[in-house]
Amino acid sequence: MFLHLLRKGSLKTFFFSVAVLIFFFYSLGSSLRNLLRYNSFKQELVISEKSLKEHEVLNRQFQEQIEWMKTDEFWVLEAKKKLGYILSEEYVYKFYSSEGN
């Protein structure tokens, strides 16, 4: 069965072939591992970018609300809602529902 190994030079060829196969499978394994790591990092990047976009929208809404709060109209409206403030030339009509809302 292993008679071909007894020939001169065949043993060297056999060990060289085994070494090449080991190197091939090692490089294949490391390539697959790196490909899997790349895919997981890419997926994490996509999730992070989605979260960033959501936070940017939320931040923009808060900035708009802060700008609205800097105006006098906002504070007059808040005084009317919370304190019942009425200007001298205004009429206020209140509607009550039977549900109590």
Image (tube, helix red, strand yellow):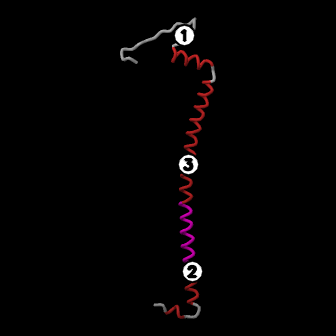
The quadrant holding residue 62 is top right
Whether residue 39 appears in magenta in the rendering, the answer is no
Give the distance between the C-alpha atoms of the residues marked 3 and 1, in whole angstroms: 52 Å
Percent of width and height locating residue 95 = 43, 12
Q: In this view, does 53 lie above or below 41?
A: above
User: Which residue carries the number 3 mark?
Assistant: 46
Percent of width and height locating residue 72 = 62, 18
10 Å crowding of disc 1: few (<14), some (14-19), many (20+)? some
Q: What element carries label 2?
A: helix
Mark 2: which amino acid?
Answer: Ala
Give the distance between the C-alpha atoms of the residues marked 3 and 2, in whole angstroms: 40 Å
User: Which residue carries the number 1 mark?
Assistant: 86
Percent of width and height locating residue 65 = 59, 27
10 Å crowding of disc 3: few (<14), some (14-19), many (20+)? few
Q: What element carries label 1?
A: loop
Q: Is residue 43 above or below residue 90?
A: below
Mark 1: which amino acid?
Answer: Ile
Residue at position x 57%, y 39% in the image: 55
User: Which residue carries the number 2 mark?
Assistant: 19
Q: In the rendered structure, are the residues bearing label 1 and label 2 in contact, judged by CB atoms less than 8 Å apart?
A: no
Give the distance between the C-alpha atoms of the residues marked 1 and 2, in whole angstroms: 91 Å
Residue at position x 53%, y 15% in the image: 80
Q: Which of marks 1 and 2 is in front?
A: 1
The residue lying toward the viewer, choosing from 7 and 62, is 62
Mark earlier in primary sequence (1, 2): 2
Residue at position x 59%, y 91% in the image: 9
Give the magenta range: 18-36
Q: How many labels does the image show?
A: 3
Mark 3: which amino acid?
Answer: Val
